[in-house]
Amino acid sequence: MPRNLTATVLFAASFVVAPALAAQRADSADAARSHYRQARSALAANDNELGFQEAVLAVSAWPRQGVYWRFLARVAATTGHSDEALAALDATTAMGFDWLPGDSLWTSLRSDPRFGTLVQRAAAAIAPIAASTVAATLPKWFEHAEGVAYDSRTGRRFVGSVRQRTIVVIDNVGLVRDFVTNQSEPRLYAVFGMAADAQERVLWVTTSAMKEQEGGVAADSGVSELRAYHLDNGRILGRWRLPAGAPHCLGDVVLGPDGAAYATDSCEPHIYRATINGELTPLRATHRDWRNLQGIAFAPDGCTAWVADWTTGLYRIDLVRQLVTPVAADPRLVTLGIDGVYWGGNNSLIAIQNGVSPARVVRLTLNEAGKTVERLDVLDRHPSASEPSLGVVLHDALIYVANSSWSNYTGDGTPAGPFEPQILLKLPVRGLRPAAKLTGTPSCS
């Protein structure tokens, strides 16, 4: 790529005046990954110019992913492209990604006054915001938390383990004990999302066979189920297995305003709905760019929902027409890397974002139609929240898992070392309310 074209690409993708962009196309994400791999190969072969050009193409294909801006900055700084390195660092900073200003990679840039300004901006962009407090620390014997649920009638909290395939309950005085274990029948797989229906006394649980779980059997690979347990005693009430033929990974599960449970499949991206006495059925609503579905949040009127795709961004779902619309956003307002997402009131969503480094909890304010993110406010960037995952909404607060442990495994799913104690954080969020069940039919225009 000629150098003048490189400058043109960087200017076109700059954040000086950034229009709202729709959720990232999945084929663009695939293209970016391909250019990233080619860049690394070229750099390994000492072809620095080709490596730089491929890094630019990765950013051009996926301008909403800060990881590629950071990669371009590193490549540009070490291959003599100082202006492009500074432009990429500017974008990385605007998106809230850490780029380690003290790293020796930036030696060639330190004499440039623009670099000093960027260092100051970066410090503010990634500074800890400890708005939350520790709600619970799990015992050392409990490993790899992912989901959490809350019984509003008793005040008990439930936490699921991916590694140990178990659910524990924390009572009002902080005592932790087993609630459902992998010795129960039917045996649990890795535990992901949970949702407590305090009125009906049901604990909804998603459980999926994963290589990271203890005692896994190869024949179970790709198996995923939605289960219902009695909220008082852990007795199994229902069990729905996704059909064979494709690997499934049910992740988050939430209660909808209609009282049904809704679960997202991260591997074969669909949204499923179930009632305690009904079938597990997929929604007609789907989208070609869904790749890695995570959390889902409902508007209180039951007419609209939003689902987070970790790879490609946010999507609005018209539940009446079963239509899916990508949610647009200024590239600086990062909507990738969202795990749990919750209705925040006043046309906003509260999102747990572990695909940004450092991880954070944000409020995304939407336009009136719910199709564009107009503002992003960081609510929490707690030092203990190294790998936040899912949470549960209380009145005026969000309790969430701070340090889920996916990074503590080797490629084959075995632990790389001891697990750090698992922490739940409680974040005050004014106006946050648990989803309420509707009485009667939703009134949707």
Image: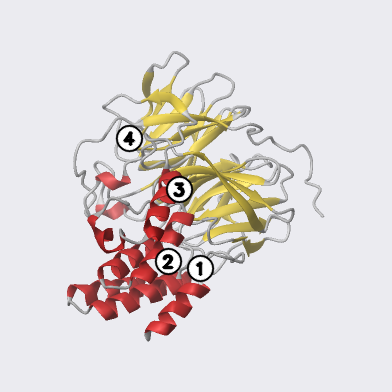
Image-based side of 17 in relation to 67, left or right: right
> What residue would you read off at disc 4?
182
Dot label at residue 14: 1
Where residue 327 appears, x then y in whole percent?
A: 61, 60
Relative horizontal placement of residue 83, taking residue 362 as reference (left or right): left
Amino acid type, label 4: Asn
Query: Dot 3 surroundings within 10 Å: few (below 14), some, or many (20 or more)?
Result: many
Q: Looking at the image, do the residues carrying marks 2 and 1 touch, with CB atoms under 8 Å apart?
A: yes
Residue underneath mark 3: 251
* Residue 301 in which image quadrant: top right
Give the residue at x 53% y 20%: 155
**Mark-to-mark CA distance, 4 and 3:** 18 Å
In depth, the one of 187 and 109 nearer the eye is 109
- CA gap between label 3 and label 1 equals 35 Å
Q: Which is nearer the N-term, disc 1 or disc 4?
A: 1
Amino acid at circle 1 = Ser
Label 1, label 4: how far apart the Cα atoms are: 51 Å
Which SS class for mark 1?
loop
In the structure shown, which secondary structural element does the residue marked by tag 2 occupy? helix
> How far is mark 2 from mark 3, CA to CA?
37 Å
Amino acid marked by disc 2: Ala
Q: Residues within 10 Å of mark 4 (few under 14, many from 20)?
A: some
- Label 3 sits on a secondary structure element that is strand
